[in-house]
Image (tube, grey):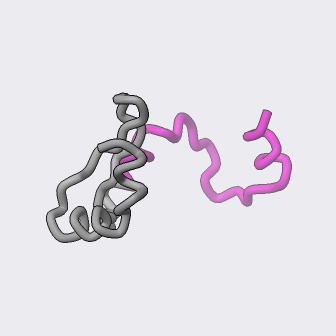
């Protein structure tokens, strides 16, 4: 569905996705740009996204200091 079609009746489509659980793809000039999906709380999904992201954890009991946070932004 196009952005303009979605915009005109957004609340209707919100309810439809909420009731059916089926996603709606929104397009811009016939290209998919957004996917409207129902919100779900899935703790496992969040953990799956983080799995394998810790490369090394030498001293897990050391406090995290300001220098540690700064090094993440370099």
The reply to whether the magenta stretch includes residue 62 is yes
28 versus 16 height, above or below? above
The stretch of residues the image draws in magenta is: 47-74
17 sits left or right of 33 in the view: left
Residue nearest the observer in this picture, 67 or 41: 41
The reply to whether the magenta stretch includes residue 70 is yes
**In terms of secondary structure, what is the magenta stretch mainly?**
loop
44 sits left or right of 19 in the view: right
Residue at the image point whose x is 24% and y is 52% from the top? 23
Quadrant assignment for the N terminus:
top left
Q: In x, y percent, where is residue 38?
A: 29, 62
Residue at the image point whose x is 60% and y is 53% from the top? 60
Quadrant assignment for the C terminus:
top right
The quadrant where residue 20 appears:
bottom left
Residue at the image point whose x is 29% and y is 67% from the top? 12
69 sits left or right of 57 in the view: right
The quadrant where residue 71 appears:
top right
Residue at the image point whose x is 36% and y is 53% from the top? 6
């Amino acid at each position: 569905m196009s952005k303009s079609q979605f915009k005109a009746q957004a609340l209707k489509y919100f309810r439809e996705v909420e009731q059916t659980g089926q996603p709606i793809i929104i397009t811009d000039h016939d290209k998919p740009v957004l996917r409207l999906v129902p919100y779900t709380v899935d703790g496992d999904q969040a953990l799956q996204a983080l799995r394998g992201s810790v490369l090394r954890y030498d001293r897990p009991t050391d406090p995290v200091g300001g220098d540690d946070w700064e090094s993440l932004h370099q």
